[in-house]
Amino acid sequence: MAYFLELLANGALVGLMYSLAALGFVLIYKSSGVPNLAQGALIMAAAYAAWLMVSWGLPIWAAVIAAAGVMFLFGLLVERLLLRPMVGQPVIMVVMLTLGLEILLRGLVPGLLGAAPKPLDLGIGLAPVIVGDVFMNRAYLIGGVVAVILIAASMLFFRTRLGTKLRAVSDDHVASWAVGLSVERAIAVSWGIAGIAAVGAGVLWGSVQGVDWTLSSLLFPAVAVVILGGVDSIKGVFVGGLAVGILGSVIPGYLDAYAGGSTRDVVTSLIILLTIMIRPYGIFGREDIERI
Amino acid sequence: MFYRLSGIHHTGYESARRLWPVPADRWQVGAVLVLALAAPFLVSNLYLGSYILPWLIWSAAALSLSLLMGLAGQLHFGYAAVMAIGAYTSIHLSQAGVPFALSLLGAGVVSALIGTVFGAAALRVKGLYLVMATLAMQYLVDWVIVNVPAISGGAQATLRTPTVTFLGLPVETLTQRYYLALAWAVLLTLFFMNVKRTSFGRALIAIRDKDFAAAVIGVDPFRYKLMAFLTSSFVGGVTGAILAFCYYRAVTPEQFSFNVSIQLVAMVLVGGLGSAIGGFLGAGFVLLLPIILTNVIADLGSSGWIDISRNLMSHLPLIFYGAMIIGFLLFEPLGLAKIYDNIRKYFLVWPFRHSRS
């Protein structure tokens, strides 16, 4: 029983950190309808940025803030230079463009800053937190708490003036233009905010597993979270993250011994497949009405 | 100029329906074919085995994928898994003593069946969700191959292809393997070009352009999407088997990983969606350009022109590859086939600029 509870608790915390990675994806999809497959590479770039600042001698909190600024600007730049020329192109072109960006970043950032894993110390410490007879990874615990805070913050953000504009843009581009909102600026801002969300995910995951290119493979669980929760729902990111994390921890916890390891990817794949077959728009997603 | 006509003017259905209506194009195709047949005698074994042979096979793979992506408009991000199924099936069938020609067919059939099951997700969803469903297929197939020792031959194992004969002809030396790959590439190209002229191909194009509109004019999207997945997975499976037997000769699961799927999609996009010549150009470009550019920069670095670290050096192919995808999508979304077409049209009406082409 303790084993089960341990898998459950750590799975939930990992899942919350997955949802942090998925947050940026949802922000961009919600505002512009672009599935951003480069989100994993953005997370990796953000972690490298934070590591670079630390290695320049900044304290970790200042490094995180500076990295957030850098990634915000980078998000704006990507939107302006790469995504805006693609407006009106079929979705496959946009998907491939973000995938091209992912490949480019995965080559460029480790190529320039070094491919060997780099430590990113948040000052969390390694001793596990013990509740009852359940051992919890301290880094995961803090990561989970930060994830909850950031998700709550982005839910509140969508109630502010700027957030309301973003929701309007995500509802209907033409109607937003008609009432005088700048759709381009809203989409650019959502890319910037996705960059900031990537810093959150990048720093937390970077402190857990070191900063190197493997951070970009967070894309796959993040995509499962997004698909399960609903691709345009922040609430869905929270619930989907918990579900993917718990299933991805409990099932391999019992099955890995029999099936020869790494069943986590299989669980993630099955979550994607089953969601798509049973309820393609996810738990909280809005069912799209297709126009001819 | 060398086309010797100013625009194409058909005087009968017979000439309008030909695959290559312009005589110069027919000469060009013939010349390329002769060069391809003579290649083993023209170039050294090194170039034949490490550049031309993989280029041919990857072109065939790109054409198989282009059938699905270019004609039917269905995205597939797990095509390497389809090819993996074909490769492993053919090897196991051959090892069990089935004649090679039949095991190629078997590879196609098994790939088609499994590929269609996953493609069935396409009947409900499109766009982003289809990408994710095929992505999940890639991971699932990879996992099954790695974790079922009966398929992969044990963990971390490579599976050697047995020595086979194709319809009585041995497939052993480099030249023999090259001719088998060439035959398959030519057959697939002809199939691809002809599919576009059949009612099946026109139905696929109608679905690509708008599936509702296609349903209104009586094309059943359900049936034709399934058939597109079936056809494409079949030829993809055979191409995977050819890849295993003619090029790799010892397969490991990593040779069919997710990155290979991305590479295939990139080949189709860089070459041009739904274009036969685009398949060949795209495969060549995606395979060779990163290698060539990296070599050029390595030469510049070693001769002291630029200072470049070993670490950056090893990441250069990835950088070029990503930049190439982005560049093509931004500046020429229709790919190399469109660039070729522009040049051809310019010369077709040369020296007049405003003639029908």
Image (cartoon, coloured by chain):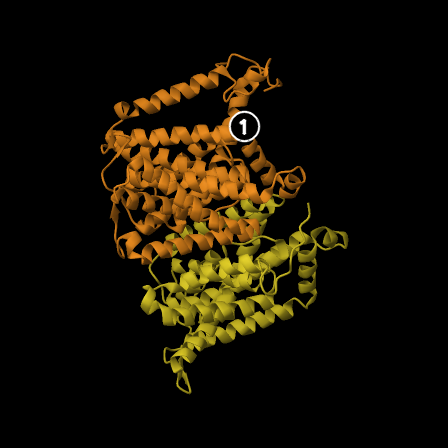
Chain colours: A yellow, B orange
Q: Residue at 44% across / 53% down in the picture?
A: B137
- Whether residue A238 sits left or right of residue A115 in the image: it is right
Q: Quadrant of the N terminus of chain A?
A: bottom left
- Whether residue A54 sits left or right of residue A26 in the image: it is left
Location of residue A60 in the rendering, given as x and y in whole percent from the top left corner: 45, 71
Which is nearer the eye, A58 or B13? B13
Chain ID for label 1? B
View extreme (right): residue: A179
Q: Residue at 38% across / 56% down in the picture?
A: A113
Which is nearer the eye, A36 or B262? B262
- Whether residue B268 sits left or right of residue B126 in the image: it is left
Location of residue B63 in the rendering, given as x and y in whole percent from the top left corner: 44, 36
Which is nearer the eye, B271 or B247? B247
Residue B284, placed above or below residue A80: above
Residue A145, placed above or below residue B47: below
- Whether residue A181 sits left or right of residue B15 in the image: it is right
Q: How many numbered dots are placed on residues in this image?
A: 1
Location of residue B149 in the rendering, given as x and y in whole percent from the top left corner: 28, 56
* Residue B188 seen in render: yes
Res. B245 image quadrant: top left
Residue B222, placed above or below residue B353: below
Q: Quadrant of the C terminus of chain A?
A: top right
Res. B177 image quadrant: top left
For numbered disc 1, what is the local secondary structure?
A: loop
Q: Residue at 27% across / 57% down in the picture?
A: B155
Residue B263, placed above or below residue A288: above
- Tag 1: residue type? Arg
Location of residue B151 in the rendering, given as x and y in whole percent from the top left corner: 30, 52
Which is nearer the eye, A45 or B309? A45
The residue that mark 1 highlights is: B197
View extreme (bottom): residue: A132
Q: Residue at 22% across / 32% down in the picture?
A: B173
